Amino acid sequence: MSGPQDVGIRNRGKAGPSVRFATSSPTSPASELDDDHTVNYNSRGRTPIEKLLESEEASVAIVGLLTLLAFALRFYKINHPDQVVFDEVHFGKFAAHYISREYYFDVHPPLAKMLFGLAGWFVGFDGQFKFESIGDSYTEAHVPYVGLRALPAILGSLTIPVVYAIMKESGYSTIVAAFSASLILFDNAHIAQSRLILLDAPLIFFMSLTIYSYIRFRKLRYWEFSPEWWGWLLATGAFMACTWASKVNGILTVVCIGIAVIIDLWDILDIKKGHSMEYFTKHFMARSVGFIVLPIILYLSFFWIHLSILTYAGPGDSFMSPAFQETLRGNEMLLNSQEIRYHDTITMRHKDTKVFLHSHPERYPLKYDDGRISSQGQQVTGYGHDDTNNFWQIIPTKALPETGRGRIVRHEDVIQLLHVNTQTVLMTHDVASPTMPTNEEVTTWPKDDHSRYNDTLFHLKLVDGHAGSSWKTKSGHFKLVHASTKVALWTFPGQLPEWAFKQQEVNGNKGIGEKSTIWYPDEIISTEEGELKTVEEMGHKEPKSMNFFKKFGELQLLMLQHNAGLTASHPYASGPFNWPFLLSGISFWTENEGQKQIYLIGNLISWWTCVIGVSIFVGILGADLLARRRGIIPIPDPVRNRLWNSTGFFLLVWAVHYFPFFLMGRQLFLHHYLPSHLASALIAGAVLSFVLSETINFPISLRGPSTKPKPTTYADVGLKGPVIVAVFIVTMFIVFVYLAPLTYGTPGLDVVVYLVLVTWKNVYVDLDYTVELVLQGLLDCVWKQYFGQ
């Protein structure tokens, strides 16, 4: 039997492969074929043009040119339109809240929004313009909006040299690095996102810096614990925290680096490497500090700054707990909150729907539409307007002091609620509610008839209350739990029929743990002795304090809940399957006069090149694995290891930023794919290098222990490389110019929209139908082959 065949598909020149193995050492064992061998396949003489292109001067000139083009394309007509565009209604508004220091709530972490606020302050924005709706004029309101848009434009432009640097540091040639950078440089989607007050440009900028820093850190693995090694370790953690704190899906970057670090540590743990457990522990602790402790500290710090700035009441107050709200200056709960005492007359409102607890003399009908029989008791409903039928008096069930106002109502007290206008007390019993047979009917009972006294008793359970907590207006969120049947007072947005004047149904819900069973006392109408103080008489109230970690925990939980709750349909929402193929876009802004529109759509050449690049790379790995199972070695080990460790890392970044969206039930849009598109541009460059390479040089990583050699380039793509890349760039630029009216909102919309939005979708529909026919044909063939029908 013959041994494995070393085919070596990269051996293309006339001369045979030349391999020189580096001497093994404790920090660089010879078994690591990745970078521990200095290999030169098919070394050949290089022409002056090739030498020029790979010179340091040429590299600086090329990255400088790409960066200048990036700034030019992203700042071109940045003042147009002078109106609020797409999600500028949200993120511009948040910047305004930072300047006015008014508390707001959002599902995304605060870093990018704080940077927008800082940019606004720097250019003189006073925060008075509130970005109410798409199309509002900046010019008429004298808003320095160009300064706000300049921040994402700068970060989006700087992403281009970072992408270039990622490829160069990964050992790819100048031409290949320029190719990957150009895929982002001339992409219409990246440009459109970078010219507006949106979070994606900061997110992608910090994500690319995280990738770059991690690659620099890994290249120093033979210089472990050196100052440079520690510097890039901590830089990776810092940029990772910035990515995480810019947008909620920045957590995917954290997951990506986490997976890479786990693989790295698993490799160090291998006993074949000859490392001790003490050595492994040192590496584990160092990475824990850089990739766990530092990012968490920074992430917490961003929220601490966020909460330190937003100290005044604002539109986000109602999302937070009463305790949180009372830490904000000018908050209604802080100013108007008063302790409630027995025999006070109050109004109560449902926390979610804001309706008042209401009753009136009309009674439930004897028979409902579905044939069920009611108690014909007095109706208790939810009513959205001020009315005297919303007045309820707190009746004690225990003796009170004989002199002075009654004692304060407290957590876990058992109370009765007297409806003032009808002199009946609130009651629930084991009778089905009007529209929900599973819930109990809520009604009232004459106060002087004690035959059903136990059915009128309710436990007052304050939210986050403890023994002795007093019940207060505005801030005293509570649940009213029936003493006998253990149901909670509840309402929901559904309306009752005409017999209840289409008011909101109130019933007894068995799910007392549900958050929708929470109410709050709105105000005290009167007291038994008429000594209620006004807000002015109560005087100025200083904000209360609350532990930062409690505020942080509450905010994080709300962010997760509301982000998961963004499930409403949207005309431009799309699924993850569509994104890599650019099958749909997003309309950001339209103006009928002049047929102008900003429509988010990528450069077709760029996106499909990336799709093909990812597909080819996965195919190469699959073919190599299959061949090796048959004893064939189609790719030399050093080249194969470079593919796994370099391009494989890019594939990991792409996959981690893409596939989790298939598991999400919230609204999704094309711009959620932009981080993965950047990663796929890196993969496309690496695949191009693999296909074109004629000379492959190692090592890439810096070696020790005495000197630090300059890393050599990974692949020499010869003279054909620049030609192919130039053709790609010219083609991408032509398509970019063709789609530019949609990117910049300039005239020419009618032709572009027809060709792109109609023709392209028709192609997709035809393709989908064709695939369906092909699959159906294959199934028919299989069926006839095996079953003869």
Image (tube, rainbow, N blue to C red):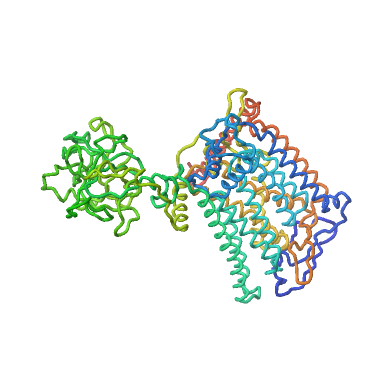
Q: Residue at x 61, y 47 (%)?
A: 202
Q: Image quadrant for the N terminus?
A: bottom right
In the displayed structure, would residue 498 be above or below residue 93?
above
The outermost residue toward the top is 593
The quadrant in which residue 268 appears is: bottom right
* Residue 591 seen from this side: yes
In the displayed structure, would residue 582 be above or below residue 688?
above
- Residue 385, position in %: x, y? 31, 34
In the displayed structure, would residue 280 be above or below residue 614?
below
Query: Which residue occupies the foreground of this view, 301 or 1?
Result: 301
Query: Which residue occupies the foreground of this view, 784 or 720?
Result: 720
The quadrant in which residue 503 appears is: top left
- Residue 82, position in %: x, y? 61, 31
Residue 55 placement, left or right of 226:
right
* Residue 566 seen from this side: no
Q: Residue at x 60, y 22 (%)?
A: 593
In the displayed structure, would residue 161 be above or below residue 590?
below
Q: Residue at x 82, y 52 (%)?
A: 54
Residue 500 placement, left or right of 278:
left
- Residue 594, position in %: x, y? 62, 23
Query: Which residue occupies the foreground of this view, 468 or 656?
Result: 468
